[in-house]
Amino acid sequence: MSVLSILAKANGPLERVMPLLTPTAIIVGAICGSRLASLEGLVPWVFAVMTFIGSLKISFLDMLRVLRRPEKLVWLMVILHVLMPVVGWTAGRLFFPDDPYLVTGYVLLFVIPTGVVSVVWVTIYGGNLALTLALILVDTLLSPLVVPASLYVLMGSTVDIQAREMMKGLLWMVVIPSVIGMLLNQGTRGEVNRKWGPPLAPLVKVGLFVVVAINGSTIAHDLRHADARMALLVVVTFGTVILGYLVGWGVPALFRWNHQDAVAVQFNSGMRNLSAGAVIAVQYFPPAVSLPVISGMLFQQLLAAAFGYRVGRSERKRSGASAAA
């Protein structure tokens, strides 16, 4: 059996443990502490490779098809970059009014682009993959502008925002690897993803574990010496993250969108590229800013699994009712 086939077979088991992957990585980071923190310089490189691999499945044609009828894409962008950042800012101001760095962390938690891993959940539960891929593409390409601008609008001069450096980091960590991957997909008419996507997919999960563990090590002291304030932070993070999923469930229900669109909107509203957010927080801000982002990693995949279970149960009921009729 070849190395490529072994890697391809490893992807299934790794996908099944996805809900536990990031919480485990945070625990490993907290335990290892400074031993992992010394590897912080590797994180942007690992993340760039992860982004490149994830983008191999994205085609510019996916975006063009969705842009012909952009209503749902527009709604997702409004949820991701208007509604939820305001929710994060409000939660930070309400519960931590004396700590501008934590408020910034809650804003950052929701201004970063949607996560490529949402493709996995949307695929599992039969969602609109074209809408998801188009959103990832648009959100990724706009991130060097949207992330610094959103932070500046909501935080102003309260904290020092290294907008230019942040834009450069997002360009080479996210945009450039994504564009290269998408051009390869387009140029080979999807052959590069069919051949290399399955064996490279496990490396994304491993890379995610490494990135989260190293970033988690930077706040090891806070995690080891958790107090009532830290407990409140975790509770607030849980509440805001679950609200993202609830908004993603409520908007399609309000407009009576079909099952495929509803699934895509729900997962993409709830998920963020939190590993990218953690990299940005650690690279360009004081350690406190990373606390909401890294604590969000504890819940994002677990909540995706929980809402996925609800989606699956609703679809089974709907299918049963249709069969009975």
Image: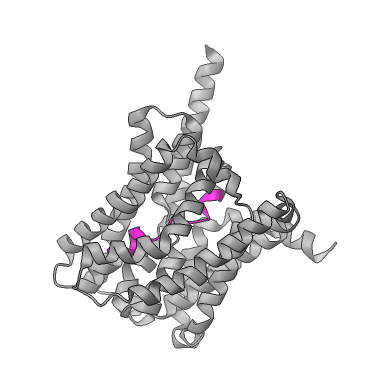
Q: Position of residue 171 (x, y in %)?
A: 48, 69
Q: Position of residue 231 (x, y in %)?
A: 26, 67
Write the residue at 57% across / 74% down.
46
Q: Which residues are magenta?
A: 107-119
Q: Where is residue 200, by image quadrant?
A: bottom right
Report the number of discs.
0
Is residue 177 visible in this depiction of the protein?
yes
Q: Give whichever of 267, 64 is nearer the camera.
A: 64
Q: Give whichever of 323, 105 is nearer the camera.
A: 105
User: Can you name the residue that lies furthest to the right here?
Assistant: 1
In the image, residue 207 above or below residue 160: above
In the image, residue 121 above or below residue 256: below
State left or right for residue 190 relative to residue 116. right
Image quarter of the N terminus: bottom right
Q: Give whichever of 35, 66 is nearer the camera.
A: 66
Q: Give whichever of 125, 85 is nearer the camera.
A: 85
Write the residue at 44% across / 74% down.
168
Q: Position of residue 115 (x, y in %)?
A: 48, 56
Q: Position of residue 233 (x, y in %)?
A: 26, 65
Is residue 127 visible in this depiction of the protein?
no
Q: Where is residue 145, by image quadrant?
A: bottom left
State left or right for residue 155 relative to residue 8. left
Q: Is residue 148 magenta?
A: no
In the image, residue 210 above or below residue 90: below
Write the residue at 22% across / 62% down.
154
Q: Is residue 111 magenta?
A: yes
State left or right for residue 198 relative to residue 219. right
In the image, residue 152 above or below residue 246: below
